[in-house]
Image (spheres, rainbow, N blue to C red):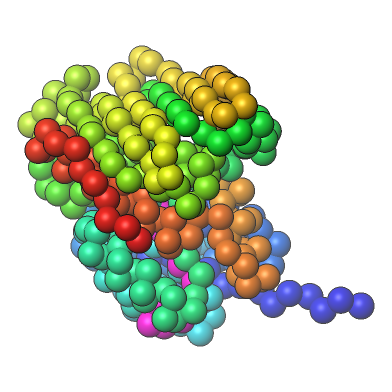
Amino acid sequence: MAKAARELGVGVVGLGVRGQHAYYHGLAAQPGVRIARMAPHPDSSPTLLEGHGQAYFEAEARKFKARLCKSPDEVIGADDVDIVVVLVEPSLAFDVIRRCAAAGKHILRDKPMVLTAGQADQVVELVERAKVKMMVTWGAYRFAPTGAKLKAQVDAVGDLAVLNLVAPWGGGPLAGFTCSKAHHERYGGGELHNFGGYALCLMRWLLGPTRPVRRVWAQMGTYFYPDYVEAGNEDLASLALEFDGGGVGSLVTGRLPKACGSITELSVVGTKGAFRTTALGGGGMGEVAADFVKAIRTDGRPAIDHRDGRAIHRALLAAYESARTGRVVELPPM
C-alpha cells in the first residue's frame, strides 16, 4: 500500500491583502494541505488591506482553523509551516522572502515579485542557496482552461516571428480603492505592474524561456481615473518588444473603466503560418496552487518559478524606464 504524502502546513504573511483573491484559498483546497498560521504584516498599506482589520483577521483564522499570529516571524519560524504565502506589497516583499528562504520555507509569492531588479537578483540567489521552491503568481493566462489548446495552436505555426497581445482588464479598481503617491511608490508602479506580468508570463510560455524579452520601448499614461493622475499611476500601457533569438511583439495592458469588460486578443505569426484568437480565458487559484504543491511533493519545477519571476520583473521595470526616458531599453543577459 502506497504511503500517504506528508501533510503540508501553510503560513500566510500579509493577511488581509487581496482578501478573497489571496492564493491561500487555492492551497487550502489541495489534498493534504492545511492552513496552519496567519499573520498580518505590521507595515501593510491600508490601501491594500481594503479596510480589513482585526475582526477580519480573526474571522479568516477561524474559517481555516488556523492560528492567528501577532507577527510574521511567528509564521515563518514555525515548525508546522512548510509553505509561506507572501501577500505583502513589493516594498515589503524582499525582506519577507529573505526570511522565508533562510528558514527553509517554500514560497508562494503573490505578484508583483519585489520592488527592484537588484532585489529580484538576490531572491534568485537566496532561493537557490536554500534549495526551496518558489512560485510567482503570474499564471492567470498560463493556467486558463484553454491554455493547453492555445499552446498547441501556437506551436503549430512554427518558430514565432511576431507575437502581439492586447489584454487590458475591465471592471475598474476594487471597491473603495483610491490611488495615492504613497501607494504608487510602495507598489512600484501602476496597472502595468499590476497586470502586465500576466501577459508577459503568457508570452514567455509561448516563446519558451530561451527567448526572453531583450528590448522594450514603452508608452503609458492615465486616461480613465482622476486619482491616478495625482498619484502618477498609469492605467494603460503600450509596449513594443524584441525577443532574444529574433522576433518582435507588442503588448497593450492596463485597467479599463469600470463599465468596460476585459479585452483579450492574441495574434502570432510563425514560420509555418499565423494564428489569432480572443479565447484566452483565465486561470484560477486552484490551478496555481496545485502546480506548486506538485512541484514540492515531486521535487519538480514550479511552472512560474523564481527565475521566471525575475525575467518578467525585469521586463516590467525596463518598460517603466523606457516610458520615463522615451528610449528603447535593452535588458541585460541573465
Residue at image x 70%, y 62%?
Answer: 31
Q: Which residues are magenta?
A: 100-110
State the residue in front, 289 or 306.
306
Query: Where's residue 48, x and y in %?
Result: 28, 47
Residue at image x 52%, y 47%?
Answer: 208
Q: Relative to 289, does residue 216 appear above or below in the rendering?
A: above
Residue 246 shown left or right of residue 88 in the figure: right
Residue 138 shown left or right of residue 45 in the figure: right
Q: Is residue 161 magenta?
A: no
Residue 125 shown left or right of residue 217 in the figure: right
Residue 209 can be seen in this image? yes
State the residue in front, 164 or 63.
164
Query: Where's residue 140, x and y in %?
Result: 50, 40
- Quadrant location of residue 74? bottom left
Q: Residue furthest top?
A: 259
Residue at image x 43%, y 45%?
Answer: 245
Q: Relative to 126, does residue 170 appear above or below in the rendering?
A: above
**Which quadrant of the figure contains the C terminus?**
bottom left
Residue at image x 7%, y 31%?
Answer: 230
State the count of labels.
Answer: 0
Query: Where's residue 330, x and y in %?
Result: 24, 46
Q: Relative to 97, does residue 285 appear above or below in the rendering?
A: above
Residue 47 can be seen in this image? no
**Which quadrant of the figure contains the N terminus?**
bottom right
Q: Is residue 101 magenta?
A: yes
Query: Where's residue 102, x and y in %?
Result: 38, 82
Residue 156 shown left or right of residue 292 in the figure: right
- Quadrant location of residue 274? top right
State the residue in front, 263 or 203.
203
